[in-house]
Image: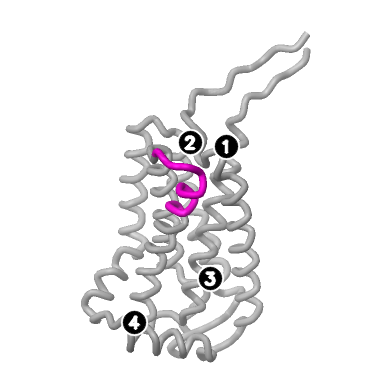
């Protein structure tokens, strides 16, 4: 005799079913990029050609005044990230998105753990010894943006491609703006910001998929 055990009422899935495979594919590519860049720039103390080109392009074609760059930078401060994380979690709970509320906490926190651990492991430095890879500011903002996009995408009346474009666009825009400020302030090399973005997308997606899997109904046979 088989007995079905109903799952707890935790609301809809974090990742819409139609988006699960595309997001896992992108997250896998991000994880591979994160590792590849870590290996490539391990122990380096100076920018390479790509970093110099990106900084030159940002300063020449997309100039950002230092004051604005600092204001953007503050959003990635751990204390500000903590407040935004709590606000986002509260909104998720208010809307009945209990699974996503869990991801809103675990995703950014684990992203921070990954970037913090990778910095000394990679050993890439900037400005005479400051650990640089991957960018924690870029990772934190990207993680919050991805959770926010997953919250909003459920309400969009659009097909799967449009929803996927929305999630990637929102996440990339947020991460890109923070990367813009970090490059302008010379706080990170451009490849550090790429690593930060990749870390966040990979970690938050992994956490989201894991939460969805753990919430699936299970059955037991006595």
Residue at position x 39%, y 61% in the image:
141
Task: Tell me how far mark 2 sits from mark 1, CA to CA.
Answer: 7 Å
- Sequence order check, earlier mark of 1 and 3: 3
Residue 53 at what x, y percent from top left? 46, 89
User: Which residue is disc 1 drawn over?
Assistant: 212
- For label 4, count other residues whose C-alpha is less than 10 Å away and answer few (under 14), some (14-19) or many (20+): many
In the depicted structure, whether residue 68 falls above or below residue 210: below
User: Which residue is disc 4 drawn over?
Assistant: 184
Residue bounds of the magenta highlight: 157-167
- Sequence order check, earlier mark of 4 and 1: 4
Task: Tell me how far mark 2 sits from mark 4, CA to CA.
Answer: 37 Å
- Sequence order check, earlier mark of 2 and 3: 2
Task: Tell me how far mark 3 sits from mark 4, CA to CA.
Answer: 17 Å
- For label 1, count other residues whose C-alpha is less than 10 Å away and answer few (under 14), some (14-19) or many (20+): many
In the depicted structure, whether residue 141 falls above or below residue 106: below
User: Which residue is disc 3 drawn over?
Assistant: 195
- For label 2, count other residues whose C-alpha is less than 10 Å away and answer few (under 14), some (14-19) or many (20+): many
Residue at position x 57%, y 22% in the image:
7
Residue at position x 40%, y 42% in the image:
151
Outermost residue toward the left? 67
């Amino acid at each position: 005799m088989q007995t079905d055990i109903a799952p707890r009422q935790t609301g809809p899935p974090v990742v819409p079913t139609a988006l699960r495979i595309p997001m896992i594919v992108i997250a896998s590519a991000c994880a591979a990029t994160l590792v590849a860049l870590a290996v490539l720039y391990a122990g380096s103390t100076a920018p390479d050609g790509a970093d110099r080109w990106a900084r030159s392009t940002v300063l020449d074609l997309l100039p950002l005044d230092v004051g604005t760059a600092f204001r953007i930078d503050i959003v990635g401060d751990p204390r500000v990230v903590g407040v935004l994380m709590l606000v986002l979690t509260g909104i998720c709970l208010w809307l009945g998105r209990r699974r996503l509320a869990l991801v809103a906490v675990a995703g950014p926190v684990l992203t921070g753990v990954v970037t913090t651990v990778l910095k000394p492991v990679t050993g890439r430095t900037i400005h005479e010894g400051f650990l640089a890879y991957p960018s924690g500011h870029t990772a934190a903002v990207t993680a919050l943006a991805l959770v926010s996009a997953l919250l909003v995408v459920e309400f969009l009346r659009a097909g799967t491609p449009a929803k996927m474009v929305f999630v990637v666009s929102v996440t990339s825009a947020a991460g890109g703006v923070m990367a813009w400020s970090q490059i302008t302030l010379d706080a990170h090399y451009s490849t550090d910001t790429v690593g930060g973005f990749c870390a966040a997308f990979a970690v938050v997606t992994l956490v989201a998929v894991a939460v969805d899997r753990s919430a699936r109904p299970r059955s037991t046979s006595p």
